[in-house]
Structures are given as C-alpha cells and as structure tokens.
Amino acid sequence: MNLFLRELKSHRKSVLIWSFVLAIFMYLSMAKFSALSTDATASQQLMQALPTTMQAIFGMVGLDLTTITGYYGICFIFIAVMLAVHAGMLGAELIAKEEVDKTAEFLYVKPISRARALAIKLAAGLLILAVLFAVTWLSTYSSIAMVNSGNVPVKELGIFSQALAIMQLLFFALGVLCAAGLRQPKRAATIIAGVVLVAYIAYVLQGLSSDFSWAKALSPFAYFSAKDILAKSGIDTTYAYMCIMASLTALSASYLAYTRRDFKI
C-alpha cells in the first residue's frame, strides 16, 4: 500500500476522536457565554473576584469575558494546548511507530530511501494537522454564530487561527525531532507531552506576576496569548517568524538524524 495512504488510514480513528472532542469542547464552552452575557456587570465582577492564580490558569487575565472575543480568549488557550498535544504526539508517532511496533524491516527493505520515507510521513502528518485545524475552525465559527446571534468576529478569529497553525507546526516539528533523534524513539511521545506541560506551566507563571516575565521565553502559548492578540489586533510577527524558523530547523535536523542513525529491529 502507498505509504502516504497507509499513514492516513492508520490515523483515521484518532483524527475522528480528536475532531469530536474539539468540536464538543467548543460547543459546550460557547453555550455558557449566553449566561455570562445576560448580566455583564455581575459576570465581570464574579470573574474579577476569582484568585489571581485561578485567573492565570484559565487564561482569564486581561480579558473581558462579557464580549465574545474576550470569552473566546479563554477557550483559545485550551484549544492551543489540545492541538499542541495532538501535533507533538502525531510527529513522534509517525517516526517511531515502525520501531515501536517492530515492523521497521517491512518498510526499510523496500526500494525507497529513508529521506523519501520521512518526506512522505511528514506530508501525511501535515495533512492530518490541516484536517484537525479545519475542524477546529469550523466548530469555532459555528459555535460562536450559535450564541452570538449569527455575528462572528471573522477578523479576530482569523488572527487566532494563524497562532494555532503556527503552534501546531512547532510542536509537530518538535515531536518529529524527538523521535528521529532519540535512540529509544518510544520515549518521544512522553518527552513531547512533558514539553507541552512545561510550556503551559510557563504560560501560567508569566500571567501571575511580572516577577515571572522570564517564563514567557519558555512558552509558545505565551508568545500568542489571547490578551496580546486582542490588544494588538494581531500576532507578534517576531515570535511568529521565530517559531516558524524553529520548526524548519527542527525538521531539517530530523532529516539528518533519521537518515544516519541505526534502527532497532
């Protein structure tokens, strides 16, 4: 079977599950917006009364939860984390699965170079990311339209979507690099999950106090925080270019590592 189609088929079930989870998350989250917007003043006072730590954990700092864009900002951080986990795990699994499943000999005895095999796997992975991105965008658009009388802030949604796509690419590249470079590739998924966790903790810390401003450097989630996106009406291009370059560098390094190391059969 064509390697590209084989990879798509093997991830079909996981894509359906992730799509369902993200769509349900968006609809259930947005369903609560109607209650908050009914009494805007009381809702805002309630949110401000929450401890700073809780506000930082849930990404509420600096957001007006009685507006649809501010409320979506809370959902945004959780969507970003879920997409980051999926992208990182996907990148790791695409590269490591033959060695983990002990089927490497069936792939690498075929008349196909490692570089080409990796390119095909990456192409399949990027298509899977695009599918999940599209599902996220469509469920976000429709759920906002459902609770906001059909009015969707398309411009803001487009900016948030750019940030999500960049973070997907970054964590996917990191997952690929972990699996390609490690002697025990089955550990790559665990490592990338830890990276996402550290990035989220750093995001929370930098939102707690200016004393933790240094933590922003450790977290792509902080590079594209909802508060900053809404304040600037755009993403920080410096961080965007930095993440894209880091992604391309990681993928390039993956090619070198993948084509040179010995596989465990």
Image: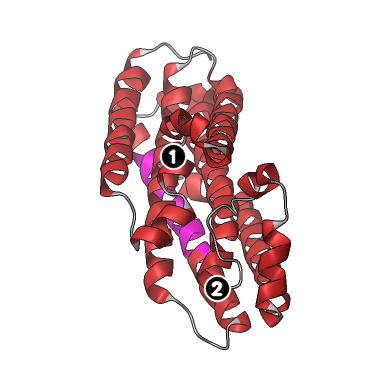
- How many angstroms separate mark 1 from mark 2 (CA)? 24 Å
Amino acid type, mark 2: Ile
Q: Which mark is residue 4?
A: none
Q: Kindly tell me whether residue 247 is visible in this rendering.
A: yes
Q: Kindly tell me whether residue 10 is visible in this rendering.
A: no
Of mark 1 and mark 2, the one earlier in the sequence is 2
Residue at mark 2: 68
Q: In this view, does 3 lie above or below 21?
A: above
Number of marks in the rendered image: 2
> Where are the magenta residues, as a range?
120-136
Q: Residue 220 carries which label?
A: 1
- Expressed as whole percent of the image width and height from the top left, the position of residue 183 reads 49, 12
Q: Is residue 188 above or below residue 84?
A: above
Magenta-drawn stretch contains 134: yes
**Given this view, does label 1 or label 2 mark the residue nearer the observer?**
2
Q: As drawn, is 149 to the left or to the right of 119?
A: right
SS label for mark 1: helix
- Expressed as whole percent of the image width and height from the top left, the position of residue 196 reads 55, 34
Main SS class of the magenta portion in the image = helix
- Expressed as whole percent of the image width and height from the top left, the position of residue 227 reads 47, 55
Magenta-drawn stretch contains 91: no
